[in-house]
Image: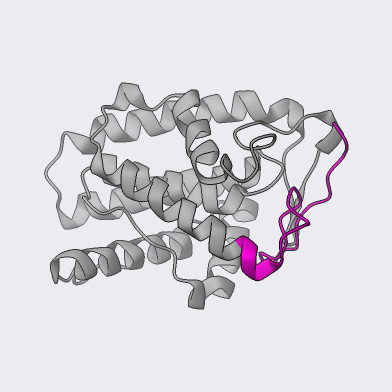
Amino acid sequence: MRKLKTSPADGGVFAFAPFLSPAETRDRIRGAEHIVVERLLKHHRQYGDWTGPFVVDIHRGIFGELFPDYAGRFRDASNNVMRFGSLDSIPAAQIDPRMQQFIAAAQDGVKQFGAQQLTRKSILEIGDAAAMGHADLIEIHPFVDGNGRWARAVTAAFIRDCGFAYGTVFVAARKREYVAALDRAILKRECGDLRRLIIDGMRDQLKKRQGYKLKGLR
């Protein structure tokens, strides 16, 4: 397989789709992402359903129709280290063990939180777990491209399976804040800012779907 260049940090042309303009890429991928996330959020899974094939299928579901040769396939030595923003991914040889660690943590989280009643304390704990897991997925950067959208969809599914019915949403207007929070979470393992963004997204989703408000959660 030929070596692929990384895509621009601002979410422009995808590395595996240089024939599409940035606007065309965003429109087509957003449509697929919306369908996949909505499908995920409609089905309840047990902690044992959180497996490697499940999280890989999320990437394949978002990108598979447009880019079947790359969707759901981990990068290899030809794309050993990927650059995203100001950070580098882990080497390709470390993807499998790091993904196994993520899966184990996700299973534990869904098992623990899914059996609890939602309270202010448990929502904050879910936000912490989601933030740490999201930072891990971005750092792992297992695919040649599409890692950000995939990681956000996985995070939304994880939160839903922990008992919060509508997952979370990452607001495009807060992209700089999101990137800065990711940097702190990955480099310093300080996930507080990322947790706030995730909980804000949970609040937005609940208000949008049910008209309720989550108060006092930061």
Check residue 6 for magenta coloring.
yes
In this picture the colour scheme is one colour
Give the residue drawn at x 58%, y 53%. 148
In the picture, which quadrant includes the N terminus? top right
Provide the major secondary structure of the magenta segment: loop
- Residue 87 position by quadrant: bottom right
Would residue 147 be found to the left or right of residue 52 on screen? right
Q: How many marks?
A: 0
- Residue 158 position by quadrant: top left
Q: In the displayed orientation, state which residue is furthest to the bottom.
A: 173
State the image coordinates of residue 88 (x, y, percent, origin top left): 76, 49
State the image coordinates of residue 135 (x, y, percent, origin top left): 54, 49
Front-lying residue, 112 or 68 = 68
Give the residue drawn at x 32%, y 21%. 48
State the image coordinates of residue 202 (x, y, percent, origin top left): 29, 61
Check residue 36 for magenta coloring.
no
Q: Is residue 209 above or below residue 164?
A: below
Q: Is residue 117 above or below residue 30?
A: above
Magenta stretch?
1-25
Would residue 197 be found to the left or right of residue 13 on screen? left
- Residue 198 position by quadrant: bottom left
Give the residue drawn at x 44%, y 26%. 104
Front-lying residue, 179 or 64 = 64
Front-lying residue, 109 or 11 = 11
Would residue 35 be seen by someone viewing this image from the given angle?
yes
Would residue 92 be found to the left or right of residue 183 on screen? right
Would residue 10 be seen by someone viewing this image from the given angle?
no
In the picture, which quadrant includes the C terminus? bottom left
Give the residue drawn at x 43%, y 24%. 51
Q: Is residue 211 above or below residue 18?
A: below
